[in-house]
Amino acid sequence: MRILLLLLLAIPAQAGDSMLWPERLEPLPVLSAPAPLPSLSAQTCNACHGQIHDQWAQSGHAQSATNPAWLASKAALGDPPACQDCHLPLIQQRAELPRGPGGGGAAGRTANPAYEPTLALEGVTCVVCHVRDGIILGPRELPPEQAPHPVEQDEALRDARACAYCHQHALPGAEDTPFLDTVGEWERSAFGQAGIPCQDCHMQRVSGAIAGSRYAAFASHGGLNNRDPAALRRAVTLMLRIKKVRFERGDTVRASAELLNTGAGHAVPTGDPNIRVELRFELLGPAGKLAKNTEPTSHWLAREVQAEAPFAEISDDRLQPGASRTFDFGGELHKKQDPGTFTLRVSLHWWAMSPEQAQELKLGPEVVSVEFAEQQIRFEVN
């Protein structure tokens, strides 16, 4: 099984004067709630910022520490502390702390007296991005008379600096090909060159109750709503081509699918090299089932890296921003196949890991994958 161990060095993007992130990947020492708030839990924020809270609750951030794919991968690796630095960023979210560098195995760890199980269930919770040193940070400063708690402005919340701590990482010896290069991909793209920040796509502005009954425009906190198919579809364009729409039994159906990265300011897919996108061809008979003697044909978009540090890149056939690729299909129509209306179905699937990895971890496809787009071409077979 090739589940990759992350022992990573954070490379912040344009750190500037931001208070958000330390220079290296490490637990965030947020130790107390800023007055007058009684708790660091997102439940506290929910009281006034209910709409933002509910968006966050459906996001990958909220489920970063509870999604089955991450839990299974972490357990298979022996629960390395480095995995928690992004999935459980607060020191209070750790049940145990390493005694020293590495902290491998139970003998290398000690109980954390500051552990708060409720916070651990919240993953990348509100205070991860909005509280430092007892201060609440926001994209704009609010005067005291407009809020029950002081809010200081941190411009990093408006640009890639807010994302780079967990989405841009390199290891010593592999700095030219960072293990996680989402922010780097964006910087090299037309989106980055035009100054279009991550937030324009991943935190689109919506109107609603921003605080209590105050109605205003604010940045959505849903992200991709935990791989919502509609959001994933906006990243790519799928074009199908077929030369004719009438065939005889015994003929070979030849078609192609062109996939274009028309909406993502980074590679498709991006992030963890375990992630991949599948383009699948299926030739369906008149009854809607696979035609006689045919099987689905899949093409995979992924970045392959070595299984050991520094995880040097082996290959990368993902779609970079603005790029396209054509995939050909040839399916033979069995001579004994019933005639009628046939369908060539082409679908796109996002996978958190390969099917082989999921099988080893005893995770079903419904847990690690989502179908997010499909098109069909119908044709007649005589």
Image (tube, helix red, strand yellow):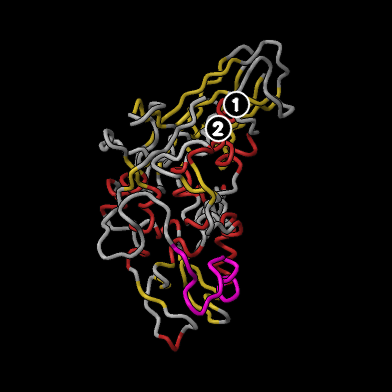
Is 136 located above or below residue 284 in the figure? below
Reading the image, the residue beneath label 2 is 76
Magenta-highlighted residues: 30-49
User: Front-most of 13 and 326?
Assistant: 13
Secondary structure at badge 2 equals helix
Residue 114 image offset from top left, x and y in percent: 53, 59
If you read the primary sequence from the N terminus, does the residue marked by circle 1 or circle 2 appear first? 2
User: Front-most of 13 and 227?
Assistant: 13
Reading the image, the residue beneath label 1 is 360
Magenta run includes residue 129:
no
User: Disc 1 marks which amino acid?
Assistant: Glu
Q: Main secondary structure of the magenta part?
A: loop
- Is label 1 in contact with label 2 (beta carbons under 8 Å)? yes
Point 37% across, 45% down: residue: 182
User: Disc 2 marks which amino acid?
Assistant: Ala
Magenta run includes residue 36:
yes
